[in-house]
Structures are given as C-alpha cells and as structure tokens.
Image (cartoon, rainbow, N blue to C red):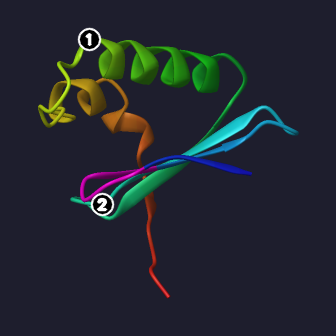
C-alpha cells in the first residue's frame, strides 16, 4: 500500500500487489477502488496532471475528477 496523494480534495492509495488504486473525493465523501485498465488510466492521468501543473500552484482537480465521477459511488466513512 502506497499513499500517492493526500490533500484537502483527494486521497489516493495505490495497492501494487493487487493492481488496484483507491480514490476518495473528500469534497463529496465518495470513493472507488479501481482495478486493471481503469486503475492504470487513473494513475497515468493523475501523473500527467501533476506534471503539467506549474510548481507552487495548486492543482485544480475538478476537471480531472469529472471523468471518473460516475465511478465514485461508494460513501467514504471516516473513523
């Protein structure tokens, strides 16, 4: 388990041993566990978005998350 990103908007955990990635949109308190091609696509697009972001600027995750919004269906419960 590797925490890829943890900020006020998004929490992303990579599970490389099973080829999955967990994504939680903190604004909407919804998440999803992506596997296979969907997980690879999410990781690739997140990496691209972070590389294109200028250093020191906060990344706008809204356009990025819109493509995965239909998959973010599980309620995120904080303990």
Q: In which quarter of the image is residue 4?
A: top right
Secondary structure, mark 1, is helix
Q: Where is residue 40 in the image (x, y as percent from the top left)?
A: 62, 18
Looking at the image, which residue is at 37% across and 30% down? 68
* Residue that label 1 marks: 52
Q: Position of residue 7 (x, y in %)?
A: 31, 55
Which of the two discs, 2 and 1, sits closer to the camera?
A: 1
Q: How far apart are marks 2 and 1 (CA)?
A: 23 Å
The residue nearer to you, when weighing 76 against 50, is 50
The residue nearer to you, when weighing 41 against 11, is 11
Q: Where is residue 41 in the image (x, y as percent from the top left)?
A: 54, 16
Residue at the far right: name it.
17
Q: Quadrant of residue 69?
A: top left
Mark 2 / mark 1, whichever is N-terminal:
2
**61 relative to 48 in the view: left or right:** left
Q: Does the magenta stretch include residue 64?
A: no
Q: In this view, does 47 lie above or below 7?
A: above
**1 relative to 49 in the view: left or right:** right
Looking at the image, which residue is at 20% across and 25% down? 55
Q: Residues within 10 Å of mark 2 (few under 14, many from 20)?
A: some
Q: Residues within 10 Å of mark 1 (few under 14, many from 20)?
A: few
* Residue that label 2 marks: 26
Looking at the image, which residue is at 45% across and 54% down? 31
Q: Is residue 26 above or below residue 34?
A: below
The residue nearer to you, when weighing 1 against 73, is 1
User: Which span is picked out in magenta?
Assistant: 6-11
Q: Where is residue 46 in the image (x, y as percent from the top left)?
A: 41, 24
Residue at the far front: name it.
56
Looking at the image, which residue is at 26% across and 25% down? 64
Secondary structure, mark 2, is loop
């Amino acid at each position: 388990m590797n925490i890829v990103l943890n900020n006020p908007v998004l929490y992303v955990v990579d599970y490389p041993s099973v080829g999955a990635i967990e994504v939680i949109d903190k604004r909407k308190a919804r998440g999803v566990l992506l596997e296979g091609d969907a997980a690879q696509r999410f990781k690739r697009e997140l990496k691209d978005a972070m590389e294109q972001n200028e250093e020191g600027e906060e990344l706008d995750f809204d356009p990025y998350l819109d493509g995965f919004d239909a998959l973010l269906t599980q309620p995120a419960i904080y303990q």
